[in-house]
Amino acid sequence: MLIVLIAAMALLIWNGSEIFQQLTFARKGLEADLKIAVTALTLNLALILFGWRRYVDLVHEAEARRDGEARAALIASTDGMTGLLNRKGFADRGEELRQAAASQGHQLTIFSLQLSRFKAINDRHGYDVGDKVLRMIAASLEQQSAGGLVARLAGDEFAIAIASPAEHVPEAEQMAERLLRAVTRPMEAEGRLVQVGAYIGIAASNPSEGQIPDLLRRADIALDRAKSNCSARPVWFDESMERALVLHGEIEQGIRYGLEHGQFIPYFEPQIDLLTGEIIGFEVLARWNHPLSGLIEPDRFIPVAEEHGLIGRLSEQIILAALVQAASWDPAIKISVNISPTQLTDSWLAQRIVRLLAEAGFPAERLVVEITESSLFADLDLARAIVTSLKNQGIRLALDDFGTGFSSLAHLRALPFDVIKIDRSFVSTLASDAESAAIVRAVTTLADALKVPVTVEGIEDAATHAAVAGFGCAVGQGWYFGKPMSGDQASALLRSRETPAIPNQTPARQAG
Ligand code: C2E
Ligand code: MG
Ligand code: MG
């Protein structure tokens, strides 16, 4: 534009000198030429004015474009609701902070904060109140964050980044405590008094060691630990959490592979009639026959299988293999199988079990399905529908691990249980703890009144056996009678039993 202006000025000067000559000429009497010269002058002036106006317009346009771009960048990096940074803004500004911290030799600390019970505020008081609460929380976090970067990453998730000299890093925990106190104080929003909970994970590192997304991921891992431990205090990231996560991933991959290659097998734990000492059935317990690690107990893989939606497939493999094996056993022997809470949310579960029975040629009357009390919380109506279908087929139903959950009478009566299994945590302390003995006796009396027989788990010695038999418990299982064993060992045990399976007559005892 400047060039246009200079060109216009040069033109004017050049033309001006020409006009001057023309005027001199006119003065010599040529009036017509004077007119032409005036016209030319006017034209040149108009040209200059036009050029100037165009220049000013272009300058304004450029400014407006710059403003628009700045506004768009601000919107793209800001959370509209709270005015805090959003995830992108946090990453961009965090990177600037990281570089500044690195140049000063400072440490970078990231706090990952998530609210709990926030959804309940939206549900109970509406979105206006929820939005107001989020804005108040955002303001509190900014106030407490000592000039650090504060972002809202998603609905109820926030992050704070601060750079500080390494010797100040231990103080981060006090800051996290302050953040927690600030967001969990009772607040008044739209005339309602509300309060949320919160968890915090913290990760700190030398800024040259990792970029912001990596540091945030570590703070998130610590946050997950805080949530799973229901920790009211901030949780620091440590390397073992990352290793546990990797292990979790490896177990998941291993389960998928193991399912394809038949590595999951049923083990059988004998169940004994406490009056006669006869084996009356077996509980089927999953084992992972791992080619490198050997036999793996279910506590290590069932929770991972549940979390990744693999428990249904795993359970079906175990149940089918168990039923196929047990189909040829004494028809009086019952087989109990465990069903996870997540399986009870599958409306096709009853059909799947019935199909397995048909495939194995195993009579429905010989099958007992064990479910825990916690299975009933997800969807009691669906659980009831599934159980009704199972019972219509003649399958029996046991309430497993009774005493560890709410153990309410309401749950006991919610479904038509045929057996109540008292959890082994009470049974193993029965001899030493009067309270456990009182609980086992009370549950047996209650079950008696409801006309539901009791099975006692975890009988490990003769004294416990005598005690539970004395309380009137009908059936027992535990290492005193036999540890979980392979299908072939269970077959051999059944073949060898001319006499009751009370200890020292039980063959095939082995580690389970
Ligand atoms: P559970 O159903 O309560 O099974 C009883 C657990 O107590 C078994 O552990 C058994 O080995 C153990 N046990 C039995 N008697 C004694 C005893 O006298 N002393 C001691 N210390 N322990 C005893 P296991 O096999 O490790 O199974 C743990 C849990 O894993 C089971 O608890 C059940 O909830 C779950 N589980 C096992 N197999 C399956 C399966 O196929 N599907 C599902 N969904 N869950 C399974
Ligand atoms: Mg069980
Ligand atoms: Mg149990």
Image: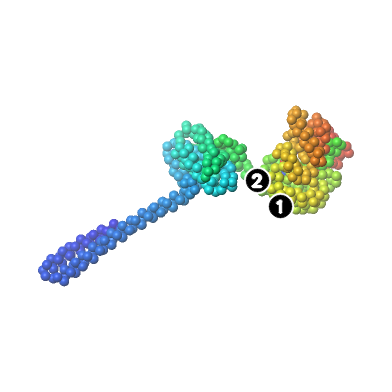
**Which circle marks residue 347 in the picture?**
1
Give percent across and percent down for residue 345.
Answer: 69, 49
For the point 71% across and 45% down, the residue is: 376
Element type where label 2 sits in the image:
helix
Q: How many marks?
A: 2
Q: CA distance from mark 1 to mark 2?
A: 18 Å
Quarter of the picture holding the N terminus:
bottom left
Residue 307 is marked as 2
Expressed as whole percent of the image width and height from the top left, the position of residue 143 reads 46, 39
Q: Residue at x 74, y 37 (%)?
A: 423
Taking 364 as reference, is 81 left or right? left
**Is residue 407 visible to us here?**
yes
Residue toward you, 16 or 410? 410
Quadrant in the picture for the C terminus: top right
Disc 1 marks a residue whose amino acid type is Ser
Which of marks 2 and 1 precedes in the sequence? 2
